[in-house]
Image: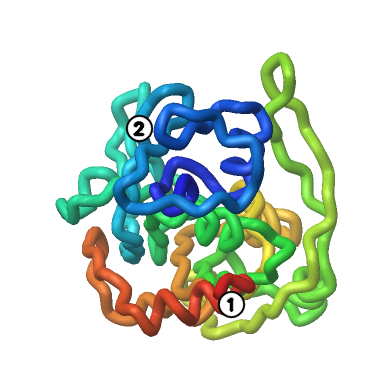
Amino acid sequence: MIAASGLCSRRKAEDLIREGRVSVNGLAVAEMGIKVEPSDEVTVDGAPILAAKPTTLIMNKPRGVVTTLSDPQRRPTVAKYLPDIGAAVKPVGRLDFDSQGLLIFTNDGELAMRLSHARYGVEKEYLATVQGQPTESELDQLRKGIAILSEEPAHRGKRMMSYKTAPAHVMLVAVDSKADTSRVKIIIHEGRKRQIRLMCQAIGHPVLTLKRTRIGPLVLRDLPAGACRMLGKVEVERLRKLVGLA
């Protein structure tokens, strides 16, 4: 019930139970898998948990918008484009400020966690417009995995870290010789911060525009920028099955 409420993932809910922070009808829960009825009162740290209706939707995130529901720097956020659906949904993963495309929102904590975790191998497809015309040799570097340098949060400030990306599916879609740009389709199973941009930068072809067009079985299609669409039951079941959820 805790995970279904959207408060956290099932794994985190189990941690809360182990820590003695969950109560049912005023009594602390001491074991996993206890069944509760709709009439039971479940609390975490004394605050009641209400079972929310499972809700999942997609958005075509516009450029110039932060993937968060609130921003201390007062930049435009995706919250501006969410419809009033009577459920507190959160974004699954992120798209950077300058990127556009498919973004999933849900209040299913366990589904969100699994979709975001690389171990479940959910494909993410991007269409990038890059500077210059990548050679097959350069694209092969991306296909095989490439070492990139990334700025990551540290205990005090930030630090530069190097890692090698997993193999990716990469295809040259079109070349504009006049503008000296190319369109490249890239499919990855990871989701590191600014990964596509860093991959293209590493082969000397920086990204000019970036759009995520697919996550697993979900395709953006002709959804306008800034628009949202609720997922149907069959679509949600396909997503859950993809990441091993009944």
Question: Which residue type does callout 2 highlight?
Answer: Pro
Outermost residue, left side = 84
In front: 5, or 70?
Answer: 5
Quadrant (top left, top right, bottom left, bottom right) of the C terminus: bottom right
At label 1, which amino acid type do we have? Leu
Which residue lies at the image location 28% right of the left edge and 38% below the top edge? 76
When asked about the image quadrant of residue 150, the answer is: top right
For residue 174, the mark is none
* Location of mark 1 (residue): 242
Q: CA distance from mark 2 to mark 1?
A: 32 Å
Closest to the observer: 122 or 22?
A: 22
Element type where label 2 sits in the image:
strand
Residue 131 x %, y %: 57, 63
Where is residue 155, by image quadrant? top right
Mark 2 packing: few (<14 Cα in 10 Å), some, or many (20+)?
few
| Residue 199 location (% of width, % of height) | 70, 59
> In this rendering, is residue 197 above or below 72?
below
**Residue at (73% x, 74% y) in the render:** 168
Please state if 234 lies on the left or on the right of 115 as rendered: left
